[in-house]
Amino acid sequence: MLKTLRNALKIEEIRKRLFFTFLMLIVVRIGSQLPLPGVNRDYFAAWFASQNGDAFSFFNAITGGSFAELSIFALSITPYITSSIIVQLLAIAIPKLEEWQKDGEDGRKKLTKLTRYLTVGLALLQAGSMTIGFGRQGLLQEFNFVNCATAIVVLVAGSAILMWIGERITERGEGNGISIILLINILSRLPADLTSLYNQFMQGKSIPRAVLAGVIIAAVIIAVVVFVVVLSNAERRIPVQYSQKMQGRKSYGGQGSNIPLKVNTAGVIPIIFAQSLMQIPVIIAAFMGAGNGTGIGSIIIKGLSQGNWCNKDNLVYSWGLILYIVLVIGFAYFYTSITFNPLEVADNMKKRGGFIPGIRPGKPTSDYLTDILNHIIFIGAVGLIIVAVIPIIFNGLFGASVSFAGTSIIIIVGVIIETLKQIESQMVVRYYKGFLSD
Protein backbone atom coordinates (compact mmCIF):
# COMPACT_ATOMS: atom_id res chain seq x y z
CA MET A 1 0.00 0.00 0.00
CA LEU A 2 2.78 2.46 0.95
CA LYS A 3 4.69 1.57 -2.22
CA THR A 4 1.60 2.31 -4.31
CA LEU A 5 1.17 5.71 -2.65
CA ARG A 6 4.85 6.59 -3.10
CA ASN A 7 4.71 5.74 -6.79
CA ALA A 8 1.41 7.58 -7.19
CA LEU A 9 2.80 10.78 -5.65
CA LYS A 10 5.46 10.86 -8.38
CA ILE A 11 2.73 11.45 -10.96
CA GLU A 12 1.57 15.06 -11.19
CA GLU A 13 -2.02 14.28 -12.23
CA ILE A 14 -2.56 11.89 -9.33
CA ARG A 15 -0.94 14.38 -6.92
CA LYS A 16 -3.44 17.04 -8.03
CA ARG A 17 -6.33 14.60 -7.58
CA LEU A 18 -5.18 13.62 -4.09
CA PHE A 19 -4.71 17.26 -3.11
CA PHE A 20 -8.19 18.14 -4.36
CA THR A 21 -9.65 15.23 -2.38
CA PHE A 22 -7.77 16.40 0.72
CA LEU A 23 -9.12 19.96 0.40
CA MET A 24 -12.69 18.70 -0.02
CA LEU A 25 -12.36 16.52 3.08
CA ILE A 26 -11.16 19.53 5.08
CA VAL A 27 -14.36 21.32 4.03
CA VAL A 28 -16.37 18.30 5.17
CA ARG A 29 -14.77 18.24 8.61
CA ILE A 30 -15.11 22.02 9.05
CA GLY A 31 -18.81 21.80 8.19
CA SER A 32 -19.18 18.97 10.69
CA GLN A 33 -18.18 21.38 13.47
CA LEU A 34 -20.46 24.28 12.50
CA PRO A 35 -23.52 24.32 14.81
CA LEU A 36 -27.06 24.30 13.50
CA PRO A 37 -28.54 27.77 14.09
CA GLY A 38 -31.33 28.29 16.63
CA VAL A 39 -30.99 24.96 18.45
CA ASN A 40 -30.29 24.00 22.04
CA ARG A 41 -27.26 21.74 21.65
CA ASP A 42 -27.08 21.04 25.39
CA TYR A 43 -30.57 19.54 25.29
CA PHE A 44 -29.72 17.27 22.36
CA ALA A 45 -26.39 16.20 23.90
CA ALA A 46 -28.22 15.23 27.11
CA TRP A 47 -30.89 13.37 25.14
CA PHE A 48 -28.28 11.51 23.07
CA ALA A 49 -26.36 10.51 26.21
CA SER A 50 -29.57 9.19 27.78
CA GLN A 51 -30.07 6.65 24.99
CA ASN A 52 -28.72 3.14 25.43
CA GLY A 53 -26.03 3.91 22.89
CA ASP A 54 -26.56 1.62 19.94
CA ALA A 55 -29.80 2.93 18.42
CA PHE A 56 -27.97 5.98 17.08
CA SER A 57 -24.30 5.10 17.60
CA PHE A 58 -23.71 3.75 14.09
CA PHE A 59 -25.58 6.67 12.54
CA ASN A 60 -23.46 9.06 14.62
CA ALA A 61 -20.30 7.21 13.53
CA ILE A 62 -20.99 7.51 9.80
CA THR A 63 -21.79 11.21 10.25
CA GLY A 64 -18.43 11.74 11.94
CA GLY A 65 -20.07 12.86 15.19
CA SER A 66 -22.09 15.53 13.36
CA PHE A 67 -25.38 14.03 14.52
CA ALA A 68 -24.52 14.14 18.23
CA GLU A 69 -23.01 17.62 17.82
CA LEU A 70 -26.04 18.70 15.77
CA SER A 71 -23.96 20.47 13.11
CA ILE A 72 -25.12 21.67 9.70
CA PHE A 73 -23.99 18.27 8.33
CA ALA A 74 -25.98 16.32 10.95
CA LEU A 75 -27.77 14.27 8.26
CA SER A 76 -24.47 13.68 6.45
CA ILE A 77 -24.71 11.54 3.29
CA THR A 78 -27.17 9.02 4.73
CA PRO A 79 -30.07 10.35 2.57
CA TYR A 80 -27.91 9.83 -0.54
CA ILE A 81 -26.93 6.29 0.49
CA THR A 82 -30.55 5.41 1.23
CA SER A 83 -31.79 6.90 -2.05
CA SER A 84 -29.10 5.02 -4.01
CA ILE A 85 -30.22 1.73 -2.49
CA ILE A 86 -33.88 2.55 -3.18
CA VAL A 87 -33.13 3.37 -6.84
CA GLN A 88 -31.24 0.08 -7.21
CA LEU A 89 -34.19 -1.83 -5.80
CA LEU A 90 -36.71 0.07 -7.93
CA ALA A 91 -34.68 -0.74 -11.05
CA ILE A 92 -35.60 -4.39 -10.49
CA ALA A 93 -39.33 -3.69 -10.28
CA ILE A 94 -39.75 -0.81 -12.76
CA PRO A 95 -38.94 -1.69 -16.42
CA LYS A 96 -38.15 1.93 -17.33
CA LEU A 97 -35.45 2.20 -14.66
CA GLU A 98 -34.08 -1.19 -15.69
CA GLU A 99 -33.87 0.13 -19.25
CA TRP A 100 -31.94 3.18 -18.01
CA GLN A 101 -29.56 0.87 -16.16
CA LYS A 102 -28.67 -0.86 -19.43
CA ASP A 103 -28.58 2.33 -21.49
CA GLY A 104 -24.93 3.21 -20.95
CA GLU A 105 -23.80 6.71 -20.03
CA ASP A 106 -27.13 8.39 -20.85
CA GLY A 107 -29.04 5.98 -18.64
CA ARG A 108 -26.53 6.44 -15.83
CA LYS A 109 -27.03 10.21 -15.95
CA LYS A 110 -30.80 9.80 -15.70
CA LEU A 111 -30.47 7.46 -12.70
CA THR A 112 -28.04 9.89 -11.07
CA LYS A 113 -30.50 12.76 -11.50
CA LEU A 114 -33.30 10.63 -10.02
CA THR A 115 -31.05 9.72 -7.08
CA ARG A 116 -30.33 13.42 -6.45
CA TYR A 117 -34.02 14.35 -6.37
CA LEU A 118 -34.79 11.41 -4.08
CA THR A 119 -31.89 12.41 -1.83
CA VAL A 120 -33.30 15.91 -1.36
CA GLY A 121 -36.75 14.44 -0.69
CA LEU A 122 -35.45 12.02 1.94
CA ALA A 123 -33.32 14.74 3.54
CA LEU A 124 -36.39 16.98 3.72
CA LEU A 125 -38.40 14.17 5.35
CA GLN A 126 -35.66 13.35 7.89
CA ALA A 127 -34.92 17.00 8.69
CA GLY A 128 -38.60 17.80 9.12
CA SER A 129 -39.26 14.80 11.35
CA MET A 130 -36.23 15.49 13.53
CA THR A 131 -36.82 19.25 13.80
CA ILE A 132 -40.52 19.05 14.60
CA GLY A 133 -40.25 15.93 16.78
CA PHE A 134 -37.37 17.19 18.91
CA GLY A 135 -38.39 20.84 18.61
CA ARG A 136 -41.49 20.26 20.72
CA GLN A 137 -39.31 18.72 23.44
CA GLY A 138 -36.77 21.53 23.69
CA LEU A 139 -34.40 21.13 20.75
CA LEU A 140 -35.16 24.60 19.41
CA GLN A 141 -34.47 27.65 21.54
CA GLU A 142 -37.91 28.87 20.47
CA PHE A 143 -40.36 26.49 18.83
CA ASN A 144 -41.84 28.61 16.04
CA PHE A 145 -42.20 28.48 12.27
CA VAL A 146 -39.09 30.56 11.51
CA ASN A 147 -36.75 28.44 13.65
CA CYS A 148 -38.24 25.19 12.35
CA ALA A 149 -37.96 26.31 8.73
CA THR A 150 -34.39 27.54 9.25
CA ALA A 151 -33.26 24.27 10.82
CA ILE A 152 -34.92 22.17 8.10
CA VAL A 153 -33.47 24.26 5.25
CA VAL A 154 -29.96 24.18 6.73
CA LEU A 155 -30.06 20.41 7.34
CA VAL A 156 -31.30 19.70 3.81
CA ALA A 157 -28.75 22.12 2.33
CA GLY A 158 -25.96 20.47 4.34
CA SER A 159 -26.89 17.03 2.99
CA ALA A 160 -27.09 18.42 -0.57
CA ILE A 161 -23.68 20.09 -0.21
CA LEU A 162 -22.12 16.82 0.92
CA MET A 163 -23.71 15.06 -2.06
CA TRP A 164 -22.21 17.73 -4.37
CA ILE A 165 -18.79 17.41 -2.71
CA GLY A 166 -18.93 13.64 -3.09
CA GLU A 167 -19.68 13.92 -6.80
CA ARG A 168 -16.85 16.44 -7.28
CA ILE A 169 -14.40 14.09 -5.52
CA THR A 170 -15.49 11.26 -7.82
CA GLU A 171 -15.02 13.51 -10.85
CA ARG A 172 -11.84 15.42 -9.96
CA GLY A 173 -10.38 13.54 -7.01
CA GLU A 174 -9.49 9.97 -6.17
CA GLY A 175 -11.95 7.19 -5.35
CA ASN A 176 -15.69 7.23 -4.98
CA GLY A 177 -16.55 10.56 -3.38
CA ILE A 178 -19.46 9.36 -1.24
CA SER A 179 -17.40 6.43 0.06
CA ILE A 180 -14.44 8.73 0.80
CA ILE A 181 -16.67 11.07 2.85
CA LEU A 182 -18.06 8.08 4.71
CA LEU A 183 -14.50 6.89 5.37
CA ILE A 184 -13.24 10.21 6.77
CA ASN A 185 -16.31 10.53 9.00
CA ILE A 186 -15.73 7.10 10.53
CA LEU A 187 -11.98 7.69 10.92
CA SER A 188 -12.65 10.99 12.71
CA ARG A 189 -14.25 9.01 15.56
CA LEU A 190 -11.28 6.69 16.12
CA PRO A 191 -9.29 8.96 18.49
CA ALA A 192 -12.30 9.37 20.80
CA ASP A 193 -13.00 5.63 20.70
CA LEU A 194 -9.39 4.68 21.47
CA THR A 195 -9.37 7.20 24.31
CA SER A 196 -12.56 5.61 25.65
CA LEU A 197 -10.97 2.15 25.55
CA TYR A 198 -7.86 3.47 27.30
CA ASN A 199 -9.89 5.12 30.07
CA GLN A 200 -12.03 2.02 30.56
CA PHE A 201 -9.44 -0.77 30.50
CA MET A 202 -5.99 0.77 31.05
CA GLN A 203 -6.14 4.01 33.03
CA GLY A 204 -5.55 3.52 36.74
CA LYS A 205 -4.59 -0.15 36.32
CA SER A 206 -1.26 -1.66 37.26
CA ILE A 207 1.37 -1.63 34.52
CA PRO A 208 1.17 -5.41 33.76
CA ARG A 209 -2.66 -5.32 33.59
CA ALA A 210 -2.65 -2.14 31.48
CA VAL A 211 -0.10 -3.62 29.05
CA LEU A 212 -2.05 -6.88 28.81
CA ALA A 213 -5.29 -4.98 28.13
CA GLY A 214 -3.57 -2.88 25.47
CA VAL A 215 -2.13 -5.97 23.77
CA ILE A 216 -5.51 -7.72 23.76
CA ILE A 217 -7.30 -4.66 22.34
CA ALA A 218 -4.65 -4.20 19.63
CA ALA A 219 -4.69 -7.93 18.77
CA VAL A 220 -8.48 -8.00 18.41
CA ILE A 221 -8.52 -4.89 16.19
CA ILE A 222 -5.65 -6.15 14.00
CA ALA A 223 -7.21 -9.63 13.69
CA VAL A 224 -10.57 -8.16 12.64
CA VAL A 225 -8.90 -5.84 10.09
CA VAL A 226 -6.85 -8.70 8.58
CA PHE A 227 -9.96 -10.88 8.42
CA VAL A 228 -11.90 -8.10 6.66
CA VAL A 229 -9.06 -7.61 4.14
CA VAL A 230 -9.09 -11.34 3.34
CA LEU A 231 -12.89 -11.35 3.12
CA SER A 232 -12.92 -8.30 0.82
CA ASN A 233 -10.34 -9.77 -1.59
CA ALA A 234 -11.53 -13.38 -1.59
CA GLU A 235 -13.13 -14.53 -4.83
CA ARG A 236 -14.02 -17.66 -6.74
CA ARG A 237 -12.82 -17.55 -10.35
CA ILE A 238 -14.91 -19.48 -12.85
CA PRO A 239 -12.84 -20.41 -15.95
CA VAL A 240 -14.35 -19.41 -19.30
CA GLN A 241 -13.15 -20.54 -22.71
CA TYR A 242 -14.06 -18.76 -25.99
CA SER A 243 -14.31 -20.78 -29.19
CA GLN A 244 -12.22 -19.86 -32.22
CA LYS A 245 -13.83 -18.16 -35.20
CA MET A 246 -12.38 -18.10 -38.71
CA GLN A 247 -12.64 -14.91 -40.77
CA GLY A 248 -10.85 -15.38 -44.05
CA ARG A 249 -7.43 -16.80 -43.30
CA LYS A 250 -7.33 -15.46 -39.75
CA SER A 251 -8.77 -17.01 -36.60
CA TYR A 252 -10.21 -14.98 -33.76
CA GLY A 253 -11.09 -15.94 -30.19
CA GLY A 254 -9.92 -19.10 -28.52
CA GLN A 255 -8.54 -17.28 -25.52
CA GLY A 256 -9.33 -18.20 -21.93
CA SER A 257 -10.76 -15.92 -19.30
CA ASN A 258 -12.60 -16.17 -16.00
CA ILE A 259 -15.61 -14.81 -14.12
CA PRO A 260 -14.49 -13.50 -10.70
CA LEU A 261 -17.25 -14.07 -8.12
CA LYS A 262 -16.45 -12.22 -4.91
CA VAL A 263 -17.08 -14.16 -1.73
CA ASN A 264 -18.47 -11.06 -0.08
CA THR A 265 -20.66 -10.25 -3.07
CA ALA A 266 -22.99 -7.81 -1.26
CA GLY A 267 -20.34 -5.91 0.70
CA VAL A 268 -21.59 -4.24 3.86
CA ILE A 269 -25.15 -3.76 2.51
CA PRO A 270 -26.69 -6.81 4.32
CA ILE A 271 -25.49 -5.51 7.69
CA ILE A 272 -26.79 -1.99 6.98
CA PHE A 273 -30.16 -3.40 5.87
CA ALA A 274 -30.44 -5.64 8.94
CA GLN A 275 -29.41 -2.88 11.34
CA SER A 276 -31.78 -0.38 9.76
CA LEU A 277 -34.75 -2.75 9.85
CA MET A 278 -34.16 -3.67 13.50
CA GLN A 279 -33.47 -0.12 14.65
CA ILE A 280 -36.62 1.46 13.20
CA PRO A 281 -38.84 0.24 16.11
CA VAL A 282 -36.10 1.20 18.60
CA ILE A 283 -35.85 4.75 17.23
CA ILE A 284 -39.63 5.18 17.18
CA ALA A 285 -39.83 3.94 20.78
CA ALA A 286 -37.04 6.35 21.78
CA PHE A 287 -38.92 9.28 20.22
CA MET A 288 -42.10 8.27 22.06
CA GLY A 289 -40.33 7.62 25.36
CA ALA A 290 -41.44 3.98 25.36
CA GLY A 291 -39.56 0.69 25.78
CA ASN A 292 -38.30 1.23 29.34
CA GLY A 293 -40.85 -0.94 31.15
CA THR A 294 -40.87 -4.66 31.97
CA GLY A 295 -43.70 -5.87 29.72
CA ILE A 296 -43.51 -7.89 26.52
CA GLY A 297 -43.26 -4.70 24.45
CA SER A 298 -40.22 -3.60 26.42
CA ILE A 299 -38.60 -7.03 26.01
CA ILE A 300 -39.12 -6.82 22.24
CA ILE A 301 -37.69 -3.28 22.00
CA LYS A 302 -34.69 -4.14 24.19
CA GLY A 303 -34.13 -7.37 22.26
CA LEU A 304 -33.89 -5.38 19.03
CA SER A 305 -31.21 -3.15 20.55
CA GLN A 306 -27.62 -4.38 20.09
CA GLY A 307 -26.52 -2.82 23.36
CA ASN A 308 -28.50 -5.48 25.24
CA TRP A 309 -27.12 -8.53 23.45
CA CYS A 310 -24.65 -10.96 25.05
CA ASN A 311 -25.22 -9.34 28.43
CA LYS A 312 -24.68 -12.13 30.99
CA ASP A 313 -27.12 -10.45 33.40
CA ASN A 314 -29.96 -10.24 30.83
CA LEU A 315 -29.47 -13.05 28.33
CA VAL A 316 -33.19 -12.97 27.49
CA TYR A 317 -32.56 -9.95 25.26
CA SER A 318 -30.00 -11.85 23.16
CA TRP A 319 -32.80 -13.33 21.05
CA GLY A 320 -32.32 -10.24 18.90
CA LEU A 321 -28.85 -11.49 17.95
CA ILE A 322 -30.37 -14.62 16.39
CA LEU A 323 -32.80 -12.48 14.39
CA TYR A 324 -29.90 -10.23 13.34
CA ILE A 325 -27.91 -13.20 12.01
CA VAL A 326 -30.91 -14.51 10.06
CA LEU A 327 -31.54 -11.06 8.54
CA VAL A 328 -27.90 -10.62 7.48
CA ILE A 329 -27.90 -13.98 5.68
CA GLY A 330 -31.28 -13.26 4.09
CA PHE A 331 -30.28 -9.80 2.87
CA ALA A 332 -26.96 -11.17 1.54
CA TYR A 333 -28.88 -13.53 -0.77
CA PHE A 334 -31.47 -10.88 -1.61
CA TYR A 335 -29.02 -8.10 -2.54
CA THR A 336 -26.80 -10.44 -4.56
CA SER A 337 -29.83 -11.70 -6.48
CA ILE A 338 -30.67 -8.17 -7.66
CA THR A 339 -27.10 -7.19 -8.56
CA PHE A 340 -25.90 -10.40 -10.25
CA ASN A 341 -28.07 -12.27 -12.76
CA PRO A 342 -26.60 -15.71 -13.65
CA LEU A 343 -29.06 -16.15 -16.55
CA GLU A 344 -27.99 -12.85 -18.12
CA VAL A 345 -24.30 -13.72 -17.67
CA ALA A 346 -24.85 -17.14 -19.25
CA ASP A 347 -26.72 -15.60 -22.22
CA ASN A 348 -23.96 -13.03 -22.81
CA MET A 349 -21.32 -15.77 -22.73
CA LYS A 350 -23.31 -17.83 -25.24
CA LYS A 351 -23.68 -14.88 -27.63
CA ARG A 352 -19.92 -14.32 -27.62
CA GLY A 353 -19.08 -17.98 -28.05
CA GLY A 354 -17.95 -18.49 -24.47
CA PHE A 355 -18.50 -21.54 -22.30
CA ILE A 356 -17.40 -22.99 -18.98
CA PRO A 357 -15.34 -26.16 -19.58
CA GLY A 358 -17.50 -29.20 -18.87
CA ILE A 359 -20.74 -27.18 -18.72
CA ARG A 360 -23.13 -26.79 -21.66
CA PRO A 361 -23.99 -23.18 -22.65
CA GLY A 362 -27.35 -21.65 -21.80
CA LYS A 363 -29.45 -22.82 -18.85
CA PRO A 364 -26.94 -25.44 -17.59
CA THR A 365 -24.38 -22.63 -17.29
CA SER A 366 -26.91 -20.44 -15.47
CA ASP A 367 -27.74 -23.27 -13.05
CA TYR A 368 -24.04 -23.93 -12.46
CA LEU A 369 -23.34 -20.26 -11.67
CA THR A 370 -26.39 -20.10 -9.37
CA ASP A 371 -25.25 -23.18 -7.45
CA ILE A 372 -21.73 -21.78 -6.92
CA LEU A 373 -23.13 -18.35 -6.05
CA ASN A 374 -25.40 -19.81 -3.37
CA HIS A 375 -22.41 -21.45 -1.69
CA ILE A 376 -20.11 -18.42 -1.72
CA ILE A 377 -22.91 -16.04 -0.63
CA PHE A 378 -23.37 -18.13 2.52
CA ILE A 379 -19.62 -18.13 3.18
CA GLY A 380 -19.49 -14.35 2.70
CA ALA A 381 -22.53 -13.82 4.96
CA VAL A 382 -20.91 -15.93 7.70
CA GLY A 383 -17.77 -13.82 7.36
CA LEU A 384 -19.82 -10.62 7.71
CA ILE A 385 -21.55 -12.04 10.79
CA ILE A 386 -18.22 -12.89 12.43
CA VAL A 387 -16.91 -9.36 11.88
CA ALA A 388 -20.15 -7.77 13.09
CA VAL A 389 -20.67 -10.02 16.13
CA ILE A 390 -17.16 -9.77 17.65
CA PRO A 391 -17.62 -6.12 18.78
CA ILE A 392 -21.15 -6.97 20.00
CA ILE A 393 -19.79 -9.79 22.19
CA PHE A 394 -17.09 -7.54 23.66
CA ASN A 395 -19.68 -4.85 24.28
CA GLY A 396 -22.01 -7.28 26.04
CA LEU A 397 -19.35 -8.98 28.16
CA PHE A 398 -17.04 -6.06 28.95
CA GLY A 399 -19.04 -2.92 28.10
CA ALA A 400 -16.50 -1.96 25.41
CA SER A 401 -18.83 0.23 23.36
CA VAL A 402 -17.07 1.95 20.46
CA SER A 403 -18.21 3.37 17.13
CA PHE A 404 -15.66 1.47 15.00
CA ALA A 405 -17.66 -1.75 15.19
CA GLY A 406 -17.49 -4.47 12.55
CA THR A 407 -19.58 -2.50 10.06
CA SER A 408 -17.28 0.50 10.28
CA ILE A 409 -14.16 -1.64 9.82
CA ILE A 410 -15.66 -3.28 6.72
CA ILE A 411 -16.40 0.17 5.26
CA ILE A 412 -12.91 1.49 6.10
CA VAL A 413 -11.07 -1.48 4.61
CA GLY A 414 -13.35 -1.71 1.56
CA VAL A 415 -13.02 1.98 0.66
CA ILE A 416 -9.24 2.00 1.10
CA ILE A 417 -8.79 -1.13 -1.04
CA GLU A 418 -11.05 0.18 -3.83
CA THR A 419 -9.35 3.59 -3.83
CA LEU A 420 -5.88 2.05 -4.06
CA LYS A 421 -7.05 -0.19 -6.91
CA GLN A 422 -8.31 2.89 -8.76
CA ILE A 423 -4.99 4.67 -8.25
CA GLU A 424 -3.10 1.61 -9.48
CA SER A 425 -5.29 1.39 -12.60
CA GLN A 426 -4.58 5.07 -13.35
CA MET A 427 -0.86 4.41 -13.00
CA VAL A 428 -1.07 1.45 -15.38
CA VAL A 429 -2.96 3.52 -17.97
CA ARG A 430 -0.40 6.31 -17.70
CA TYR A 431 2.54 3.95 -18.18
CA TYR A 432 0.89 2.40 -21.23
CA LYS A 433 0.31 5.86 -22.70
CA GLY A 434 3.96 6.70 -22.10
CA PHE A 435 5.07 3.50 -23.78
CA LEU A 436 2.87 4.08 -26.85
CA SER A 437 4.03 7.70 -27.24
CA ASP A 438 7.74 6.85 -27.26
Image: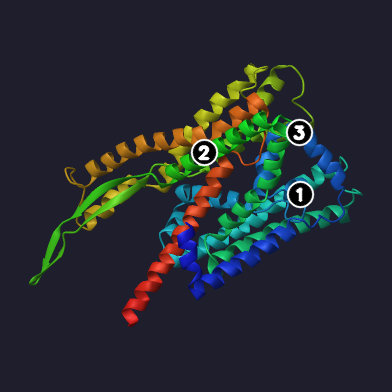
Circle 1 residues within 10 Å: few <14, some 14–19, many ≥20: many
**Residue 168 placement: quadrant:** bottom right
Q: Earlier in the sequence, mark 3 or mark 1?
A: 3
Whether residue 400 appears in this view of the structure is no
Q: CA distance from mark 3 to mark 1?
A: 21 Å
**Type of residue at label 3?**
Gln
Amino acid type at circle 2 is: Val
The image quadrant of residue 306 is top right
Tell me the residue that label 3 is attached to: 51
- In front of the other: 56 or 198: 198
Q: Nearer the viewer, residue 123 or 241?
A: 241
State the residue at coordinates (78%, 48%): 69
Which residue is at a point 49% across and 65% down the rendered structure image?
Answer: 6
* Number of residues whose C-alpha sits closer than 10 Å to that of mark 3, classed few (under 14), some (14–19) or many (20 or more): few
Q: Which residue is mark 2?
A: 224
Q: Position of residue 148 (x, y in %)?
A: 84, 52
- Circle 1 is placed at which residue position? 128
Give the residue at the far front of this rendering.
207
Q: Is residue 17 left or right of residue 29?
A: left
Q: In which quadrant of the rendered view does residue 245 lie?
A: bottom left
Whole-percent x and y of residue 66? 73, 50
Against 252, is 13 above or below?
Answer: below
Q: Nearer the viewer, residue 281 or 403?
A: 403
Q: List the single residue furthest toward the bottom.
A: 438
Q: Is residue 315 above or below residue 212?
A: above
Question: Hey, what amino acid is under mark 1?
Answer: Gly
**Element marked by disc 2:** helix
Q: Is residue 306 above or below residue 129?
A: above
Q: Residues within 10 Å of mark 2 (few under 14, many from 20)?
A: many
